[in-house]
Image: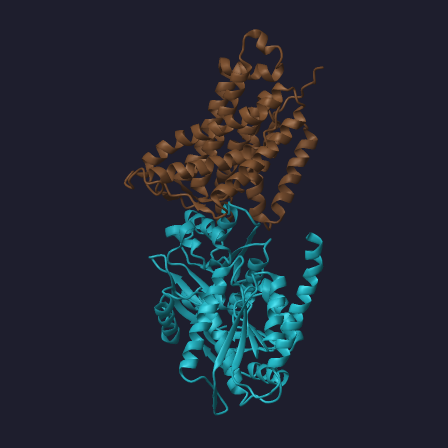
Amino acid sequence: METILQTLIQNVLNALQWGSFYSLIALGYCLVYGVLQLINFAHGDIFMVGAYIAYFVATLFLGQQFGLFSADMPGWLVLALAVPLTMILTAAVGVTLERVAYRPLRRKGANRLYVVITALMCGLVLENGNLALLGASRRKFPALIEETVWDFGLFSVTNLRIGVILAAFLVFVLLQIIVTRTKIGMAMRAISWDRFAIPLMGIPVDAIIIFTFVLGSSIAGLGGLLFAMSYPVLEPYMGALIGWKAFIAAVVGGIGSIRGAYVGGFLLGFVEIMVVAVFPSTFRDLISFTILLMILSYKPTGLFGMAKTTKI
Amino acid sequence: MRMSLKRLLPLALLSLLGLALAAGCGGEKKDEIKSIKLGFPIPITGDIPKVGDMSRKAAEMLKEEINAGGGLEVAGKKYPVEFLYEDNESKAESAVSAALKLIEQNKVLGLIGPQASKQAIPAGEVANANKTPMISPWSTNPATTKGRPFVFRACFLDPFQGPVAAKFATAEFGAKKAAVLFDIASDYPKGLAEFFKKAWEEINGPGSVVAYETFTTKDQDFSAQLTNIVNSGADVLFTPQYYSEVALIVPQARKLGWDKPILGSDSWGSAELMTLCGDACKGLFFTTHYAAAGATGPTKEFIDKFQKKFGETPDDVAALTWDATKMMLAAVQNTGGLKGDIAAQREQVRAALAGIEKFDGITGSMKFDAEGDPIKCAVVVKITDQGEFSFYKSVCP
């Protein structure tokens, strides 16, 4: 009896950590979709790029690479520097994608379908560009902080695990505040309502869109950094599958809704972990996506989504 | 110009072929042998040139050693040995042509190689069809030797490691209950996990594998499976995975509170393991073919000689090639004198190979089973605190 309880509690914690990553990625999908109605399929790969940027930043400061710094910098300081730097650099990648790939199409008034296909291609370019540039051999993310295991008898957690769960929650709260309580957030929501009327109100649409990409990509960068710390083996295709799944999580939560993306990520994390805890792992995707499918067929707009009528 | 070239090419090829045939027939009229000729169809170019390079170096070292002593003694008479290396470009098609060339044109007594299963399987077909004995030092795929009386190998097969790991863990850690974590979507780990489970339950009774957890290729999070394993009360964790997954599994297990031994298979044995896994993997064990660090006896002598001659540590390919070649030569000696034409001689060598009672090689003592696969002992390697793969002990099934 006690073992069952132990396993259950421990798996709840496992699911919270795993769900945090889905949530962080789903939030990025959700932001861009909410503003542009664009499914940014490159988002999972931006997450991967974020993990690689974090790797280069961390090894640079630890003096393991490029030789610019000596090797005596403490890990916590490296982490403190790596978080903002990774977020800024990943945001730059996201904005570059927007400028190079999405904006020209938007200017030409291309159908949304073409933009989505472009996003898919951008993702492939990022993956294979990385493969060509850095090679297929995997990279080991250095340990930045001493991971301590706290054993509570019933379950055990590490400081990193708690950090990940907290970070996902903080990002969610922050986004919720930005989108619902600030002027720029109001502008973002307004663009999603009517992109053509908005410039008439004196709102710089392009600037707001750039801001959206900055937000979404920097969250992906943070997610990449935390992911690399938790699962320290990096490879070019690491973002593809997790990105797809996070997108589905965002849809189930109700795409366009911040709360929906956050809850959807955790929902998928919980279902996956609990299925694996009981069944062979081959059942995981089968069962978890069947459950998500049932939720969608019952509530097609997702858990927190609102039905919207298309305006002509 | 283009037309004439096109017309000329088949002609040129034909004449070359004719020349080659003439040369091949001309050289082999008499039955009396002057030297023991062995062929090495190995990947000198292509994806894995290092494998070919190591095989050639090991063979060259052996040849020099034998010829320095006057040659190989067969039935009271010494014959020099002659090794012919043929590049199979690490391709299946070239493996066939390289093997054919050695068999038909160079009239070798036997073949050592190819190394990788991709080339060893088609080349084995050629060798068997032409009734030429062949030993693949390195190919682990069962298809290489299956149903081919002329084809042998020097390394053990994948399933063999399961019982070895089970036996070692029971004896070394005094473990009674075991947990297994493996990739159910990949043939190698899946097969190994099944063989381990079977062997473990034979030793420790039914139900003694208390956790048998799976994941699918490309998974990065194993927390649910490892939670089950930690709470199952198992004494040892066996995970026959590739090095990149091991680097994720081991630290995650430690963080979930697993402080008992973790055991792996020969797929761990890559230098990359230590770069990716780091300190977490130190002190763990895995089973494999051969270990350079910490070797003793003849293995140590071989390593020292190799290092002195070529300035590098021999890897498992070099060691297995050495053993395979020596085994073939031992079989030639066991024939008690080669008689008849080349076809008869090859048949005599095959019979002698199949009949080897016990061969003490540097990768362990071995003999062949009915399928041409060796029955030999595996090496258990301990990862030292310096991150070296060091010989720990030899375990027989």
Q: Position of residue B283 (x, y in %)?
A: 37, 58
Q: Position of residue B112 (x, y in %)?
A: 54, 73
Q: Position of residue B373 (x, y in %)?
A: 57, 73
Answer with left or right where residue B254 lies relative to residue A195: left
Total residue callouts:
0
Q: Quadrant of residue A201?
A: top right
Q: Residue at x 51, y 83 (%)?
A: B35
Answer with left or right where residue A43 lies relative to residue A228: right
Q: Residue at x 51, y 56 (%)?
A: B241
Answer with left or right where residue B341 lies relative to residue B309: right
Answer whether residue A259 is visible to the viewer in this image: no
Q: Which chain is represented by cyan in the image? A: B
Answer whether residue A208 is visible to the viewer in this image: yes
Which colour scheme appears in the figure? by chain
A189 relative to A267, above or below: above
B93 relative to B68, above or below: above
Instruction: Name the residue at the bottom extreme.
Output: B76
A261 relative to B395, above or below: above
Name the foreground residue: B81 vs A34.
B81
Name the foreground residue: A153 vs B152.
B152
Instruction: Name the residue at the top extreme.
Output: A201
Name the foreground residue: A275 vs B13.
B13
Q: Position of residue B41 (x, y in %)?
A: 55, 69
Q: Which chain is represented by brown in the image? A: A
